[in-house]
Amino acid sequence: MAFALNSYPITYRAKFFNGKWDEEYLEKPHRTPETEAAMSAEERDKIENSRNCYDDMPLVNYTSQYGLACFEGLKALPQKDGGLAIFRPDRNAARFSKSMQGLYMPPFPDELFLKACIETVKRNTALGFCPQYKPEWEKDAFMSADSVYIRPFTLAEGGIGVNISKEPWVLIITTPVSSYFSGGNFDTVVTDRIRATPRGTGWIKGSSNYTIAAMAKHEAVQAGYMECIFLDAIEQKYVEEGSSCNIFFYLKSGELVTPELGDTILPGITRASIIELARDRGINVSERKVAIEEALEETKECFVSGTAVGATPITSITWKGKKVIFNNGTEGEFTADIRNTIKSIQYGTLPDTKGWMMRVI
Ligand SMILES: *Cc1c(COP(=O)(O)O)cnc(C)c1O
């Protein structure tokens, strides 16, 4: 399953028109999940593809032509005691609205975002489209566990002249996912491409940021790495983040460092949660500039964070042809603890003392 698109049938769609959001839920073609599971791969592809097609939306628009769009990614997770809960959706709602404003779109109200995410998951669940909690996931600390990935995104109105989107759609689709990184290696390479520039859009969860990220990640994977790491645009000296994830260095001194936020780094919700969990453990956490040279010399453990990746260990970084291996090429104790804690809160095997989980059913 990994991170492939197998859209569930119910989609949420809202259109900004005459100063307000008109909402609807669309039921795309489907059979029962059991009938679909019994179909041939070809038949199943056909029905799943049909759920990704909308013949009443404009092909030529400011998103397809100029990359004017932003999105969110959040998860609804099957709970140990039954039902589903979403991890910190209020944070995604706030960031989505900020991203839209950053792109000069009318912001989508937080209340609508929360309600639509919950309702979309609920309606798909009612049709039987949702993963079931499996106690065996506890054995590998939820590394192989399933969840519902929720993808809210904007789509611009039709148009050909370069323009901002004044009357966008907001759509929410859901798809089942398991673990994100499929390969067995956790090696990374520093790319000399530049993801985000000062005064640019790096702080926005914008689709256009992903052009360079996708190219750099492709190059890294072709060269045998799991992920690429970006440095700052000006000096090519300070670590910024991965292609779609934030980065942490647990130093030999016991300090946990992650690059400070600014206009070139995406303010990750997993990042913020990890900072909080580490501080609760009495760890000295710094959000500051971290030079690649310092990171390579002083790091005991390294990991990346994000909704899709959770907290994933990085066992080596290659920079200028030199490979530096951390913790003998294995996941460190601190990383495993943080990874485990987040997942356990998310799947409900640890108490949610911070009120991070929002119940769907
Ligand atoms: C979404 C994203 C992240 C991770 O953010 P989370 O809120 O933790 O999922 C990190 N970097 C980039 C570039 C992103 O788009």
Image (cartoon, rainbow, N blue to C red):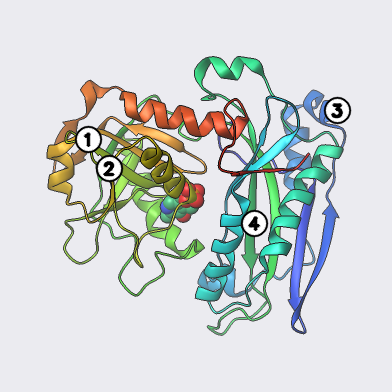
Secondary element at tag 3? helix
* Residue located 14% across and 38% down the image: 298
Q: Are marks 2 and 1 in contact (CB under 8 Å)?
A: yes
Q: Compare marks 2 and 3 and give the one earlier in the sequence.
A: 3
* Residue located 58% across and 56% down the image: 92
Q: Is residue 296 left or right of residue 257?
A: left
- Name the residue carrying label 2: 284
Secondary element at tag 2? loop
- Name the residue carrying label 3: 35
- Name the residue carrying label 1: 254
Q: Is residue 283 left or right of residue 158?
A: left
Q: Compare marks 1 and 4 and give the one earlier in the sequence.
A: 4
What type is the residue that disc 4 sits on? Answer: Pro
Q: Compare marks 2 and 4 and give the one earlier in the sequence.
A: 4
- Asked if disc 1 is less than 8 Å from ligand 1, the answer is no
Q: Compare marks 2 and 1 and give the one earlier in the sequence.
A: 1
Q: Position of residue 231 (x, y in %)?
A: 24, 55
What type is the residue that disc 3 sits on? Answer: Thr
Q: Nearer the viewer, mark 2 or mark 3?
A: 2
**Which of these two is toward me, 343 or 350?**
350
Q: Nearer the viewer, mark 2 or mark 4?
A: 2
- Residue at mark 2 to residue at mark 4: CA–CA distance: 35 Å
Q: Are marks 2 and 4 in contact (CB under 8 Å)?
A: no
What type is the residue that disc 2 sits on? Answer: Asn
